[in-house]
């Protein structure tokens, strides 16, 4: 092998193995308060902490995560708003904002997968729950269902009120209130 080929191989190796690990983005589309968070920013967020989840819904065992209270990220969102968490595969979980904003009882957290310490696969033929996963501490206090634990979250979007999105669902205005 000549010197040029060797230099090329060394350069290629440096690019492949010397580049930083993949870091994900979380897009928050909250109307006037849109924001894109990088994994690194969230891991260093002032409210980030390590939390323990007993019998995690997706992993079916106890898990520990680095997480930020979701309420800290939902700037400008009110309890009567509706949000949609969209996963990398397109799955969308629509949720009322009220439980996501709780600071007591059932509390929503955005778990952040550290690229240097990836989470295990969900099963033999599936990837892990990262890069972002909505988890709950004390979920029984708020009757939190498994659908409210979306994983592989890519974005969280503020939705228009149900009456605007689905006007046909509203009762006819001509109906009496007691009908």
Image (cartoon, helix red, strand yellow):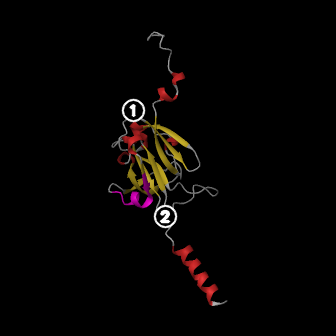
The segment highlighted magenta reads 36-45
Please determine whether, in this image, residue 179 is positioned above or below residue 97: above
Give the mark, 1 or 2, whose residue is nearer the N terminus.
1
* Picture residue at 59% right of the left edge, 57% below the top: 127
Which residue, given by chain and number where applicable, does mark 1 sit on? 80
Residue 29 spot, x, y in % from top left: 45, 44
The answer to whether one can see residue 141 in this image is no
36 lies left or right of 126: left
Residue 104 image-quadrant placement: top left
Check if residue 99 falls in the magenta segment.
no
Residue 48 or 167: which is nearer the viewer? 167
Figure disc tally? 2
Residue at image point 50% right, 56% down: 131
Q: Position of residue 25 (x, y in %)?
A: 47, 55
Q: Position of residue 36 (x, y in %)?
A: 43, 52
Marks 1 and 2 close (CB-CB < 8 Å): no
Give the residue furthest to the front: 4
Extreme residue toward the right, this view: 1
Please state which of residues 99 and 52 is positioned toward the viewer in this rendering: 99
Which quarter of the rendering shows the N terminus?
Answer: bottom right
Q: Tag 2: Cα neighbours inside 10 Å, few (<14), some, or many (≥20)?
A: some
Q: Secondary structure at mark 1?
A: loop
Tell me if residue 40 is in the magenta stretch: yes
Q: Which residue does the numbered mark 2 point to in the structure image?
A: 115
Q: Is residue 113 above or below residue 70?
A: below
Residue at 60% in and 82% down:
8
Characterize the local packing of mark 1: few (<14), some (14-19) or many (20 or more) Cα atoms within 10 angstroms.
few
Is residue 21 visible from the viewing direction of this image?
Answer: yes
Give the quadrant of residue 126. bottom right
């Amino acid at each position: 092998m000549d010197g040029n080929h060797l230099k090329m191989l060394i350069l290629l190796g440096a690019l492949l193995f010397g580049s930083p690990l993949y870091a994900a983005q979380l897009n928050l589309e909250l109307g006037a308060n849109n924001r894109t968070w990088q994994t690194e920013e969230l891991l260093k967020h002032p409210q980030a902490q390590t939390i323990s989840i007993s019998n995690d819904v997706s992993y079916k065992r106890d898990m520990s995560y680095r997480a930020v209270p979701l309420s800290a990220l939902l700037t400008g969102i009110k309890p009567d708003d509706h949000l949609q968490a969209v996963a990398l595969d397109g799955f969308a979980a629509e949720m009322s904002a009220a439980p996501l904003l709780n600071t007591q009882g059932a509390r929503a957290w955005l778990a952040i997968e550290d690229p240097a310490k990836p989470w295990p696969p969900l099963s033999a033929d599936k990837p892990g729950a990262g890069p972002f996963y909505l988890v709950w501490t004390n979920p029984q206090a708020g009757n939190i269902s498994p659908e409210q634990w979306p994983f592989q979250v890519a974005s969280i979007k503020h939705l228009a009120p149900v009456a605007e999105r689905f006007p046909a669902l509203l009762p006819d205005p001509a109906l009496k209130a007691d009908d």
